[in-house]
Amino acid sequence: MITLIARTMRIRPSFCAVCVLYGKNKRHGADLRKLFGTDGIRGVAGQYPLDKNTVYAVGRALGDHLPAGPRRVLIGQDTRESSAWMADTLIAGLRDSGVETASAGVVPTPAIAYLTHTHKFSAGVVISASHNPWQDNGIKVFGGDGYKLPDEIELEIETEIFLLLQENASQEHVVPAGSSLPGDAGLRQDYLKWLARAIPGAERLKIVIDCANGAASPVAPDIFTRTGARVEFTHCTPNGRNINEQCGALHPEIVAQEVVARKADLGICFDGDADRALFADSNGRVVNGDAIMLLLARELKGRGELANATVVATTMSNMGLEIAFRESQIKMLRAPVGDKYVLDEMKKTGAVLGGEQSGHIILAREATTGDGLLTAMRVLAVVAAGSRPLAQLVSGMKVFPQTIKNVRVQEKRPLEQLPAVMAEIRRAEQQLNGNGRVNVRYSGTESLARVMVEAETQQTVDELANRIAAALDSAIGTGSPAGHT
């Protein structure tokens, strides 16, 4: 899997900011990894690399790489029908490495990060494919400190996984019947106790919450009912195959429509594993991660708690966000896409707030990873504390027209090896002539190339994105549509 490095330019309202992603990310060593992407291992459940033999090997290899001493690993999962057998298979591998295991059952990804650290587990693992469709699944790993593993450690684990697969190539691993590990309700309650609380002023608000039929479903009703707000829930009945299906953070327009129909004050939607959240204001407009970072940064700065007056975003954040931050005397840094890379930059600079346009928001004083439920609680508290609605709280940001066009690819070849694609990128730079941004990168979790274009007009955005996407499709595409995000 190829992870790409960024070439960026300082953004000013009247100047170009072209960000072309290409080549290899030597800093993170991610160019050498073949299984782990920007958010763990992901694929179609039951097929390599998520077949039973490989999942078992992941458990064995992870167990072998844990620090010396009592080795304990916490497991959590989302609501996909494949999550149960994958968790059982992974646990079998861990146990064969001499590791003690515990399960929190169906919980959000950030719950495992929190519980791993606070209960002093050696590591935590989440079986989830986040926003992907139900047929997919994934394996996310947290270290004992609650942070995602560095790329270098993931590479070491990968090396052993491949050795184990070679040793056992002729046999299929079978998980013994009755080996499922029941979820510990006490662990889930510990996460709820940490997160759930009454919010002064929330009783004035009516909220619609879309749980995406995912991991938020068993915990969100408890958490948000305790706030005191009047809350109505949608897409909160998972059946194993309806996770993310026309709902949740993948389709925020759905909750936006519900907010208007139910005459609510705001809407909140989560993705399948609830590590990100998007919002809708009372007018039915979607409020994305860029706007939420602006809201939270202003609030933290007003309280004197925005360390170094700095926020870390990614190469995908809108140019308008950087301009709005500058007008609020806040410095914005850009990291590669992936919340682990945002967090890396936050640690280096001392920033306490960072995130992605997609709704991954990291509040570093409180959490070690993006937590959609925590983000929602913080936004709700800001709205409840004042007299201004969400729409006014995120005002003041001019959003440049932007599109993200996905291209399904057969391989993730470095872009500099694709002359026709690089020619279209350079042609786009020349046409923008200092008034826009181009960002081309491979997804770290799917077989996609993502083409992002920002410009002053939607016509220019669409024209340039379509040209670059067509060149990518011609060079390495599968010919099947992937659409926009």
Image (cartoon, rainbow, N blue to C red):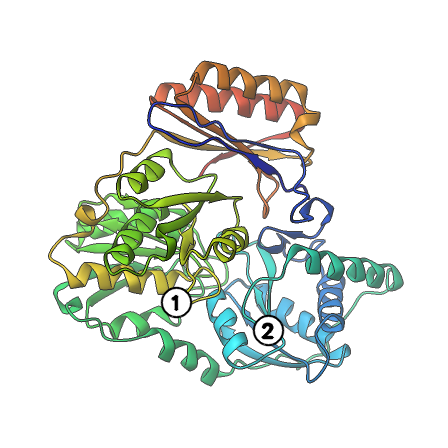
Q: In x, y percent, where is residue 432?
A: 43, 18
Point out the frontmost of discs 1 and 2.
2
Number of disc labels: 2
Q: Amino acid at mark 2?
A: Gly
Q: In x, y percent, where is residue 482?
A: 52, 35
**Residue identified by numbered label 1:** 217
Q: Residue at x 31, y 42 (%)?
A: 325
Q: CA distance from mark 1 to mark 2?
A: 26 Å
Q: Quadrant of residue 152?
A: bottom right
**Residue identified by numbered label 2:** 144
Q: Alpha-carbon neighbours of circle 1 within 10 Å: few (<14), some, or many (≥20)?
A: many
Q: Quadrant of residue 2?
A: top right
The mark that comes first in sequence, 1 or 2, is: 2
Left or right: 36 as drawn, with respect to 239: right
Assign a secondary structure to mark 1: loop
Q: Alpha-carbon neighbours of circle 2 within 10 Å: few (<14), some, or many (≥20)?
A: many
Q: Amino acid at mark 1?
A: Ser
